Image (cartoon, grey):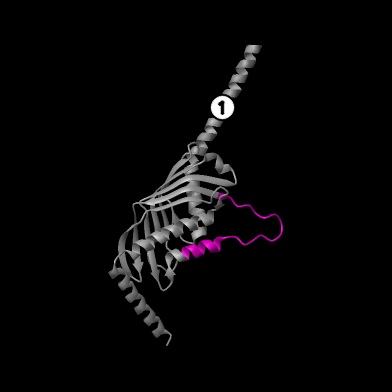
Amino acid sequence: MLNKYNLAMRKILWAAFAAVILVAGILYLNLDRLVKAAIETYGPRLTQTTVKVGRVNLSPFSGRGRIRNLEIGSPRGFNEPYVFRLADIRIRLVPKSLASDRMVIEEIALVGPEVRYETGPNGSNFARIQRNIDAFLPPPSKGGAPSKPKKVRIDHFSARDGKVYANLYGVKASLPLPDVTLEHIGSDEGTSIQDAVKRILSALSSSAMSAIAQGGKGLKEGAQSAAGAVSKTLKGLFK
């Protein structure tokens, strides 16, 4: 009788263990697709541009992952096909933080990012995206318990070996993008995802502007000349 009981228990435990492995396997296989779908759904709402992802590879156990060919399109009114093209994003996070109110990302590394900075009569594409992110922020709740959005802490962010393609009133140039390093985004308490994205975009924008400022006298003079011509044309239209 005892042997039959032990055998039944072993079968139940084996079945339970097999079920856990099966569920874990299904979650592991579908995690990449779920994250890719989340980026392509949440990203356009945040930036109000197209957001495309080539491939996502994430390990829920090690917390390491890579995102390939992430492209953020240009806002309306701009000619460049995209603002960012990130061929390789490497991520390392604390897996257990995914289930908490504060996600802890130990590192985000952009390898070989492409930045397209465009400015014209509608301002710059960077400034437009940052305004779009600001507009995405929900209004303060009226009545009831205030919502508690998920926060994020990013210990280290870097972007290296990148390029900036400048388009200043139609005057174009290709320049190396100075490396970017940010530490402790959100500190211990964390910050909103919107704020973290804005800080990263601001750092990349500053790096692009630094490259353009050092890009040569011809680029700046050409842009100033083109801007002057556009201004005269607009004034003529309203006379």
Q: Quadrant of residue 232?
A: bottom left
Q: Give yes or no for residue 136 being in the magenta stretch.
A: yes
Task: Give the quarter of the figure containing the N terminus.
Answer: top right
Residue 81: percent from the left, percent from the top?
Answer: 38, 62
Disc 1 is placed on an element classified as helix
Residue 50 makes an appearance in the image: no
Please give the name of the residue rendered at 32% of the width and 64% of the height, measured from the top-left corner. 214
Q: Give yes or no for residue 149 being in the magenta stretch.
A: yes
Q: Report the amino acid beneath label 1.
A: Phe
Q: Residues within 10 Å of mark 1 (few under 14, many from 20)?
A: few
Q: Is residue 138 left or right of residue 228?
A: right
User: From which residue to which does the magenta span run?
Assistant: 128-151
Q: Is residue 184 left or right of residue 213?
A: right
Q: Nearer the viewer, residue 16 or 64?
A: 64
Furthest toward the bottom, the residue is: 239
Residue 69: percent from the left, percent from the top?
Answer: 39, 51
Task: Give the quarter of the figure containing the C terminus.
Answer: bottom left
Residue occupied by mark 1: 17
Please give the name of the residue rendered at 52% of the width and 40% of the height, measured from the top-left corner. 95
Furthest toward the right, the residue is: 144
Q: Quadrant of residue 223?
A: bottom left
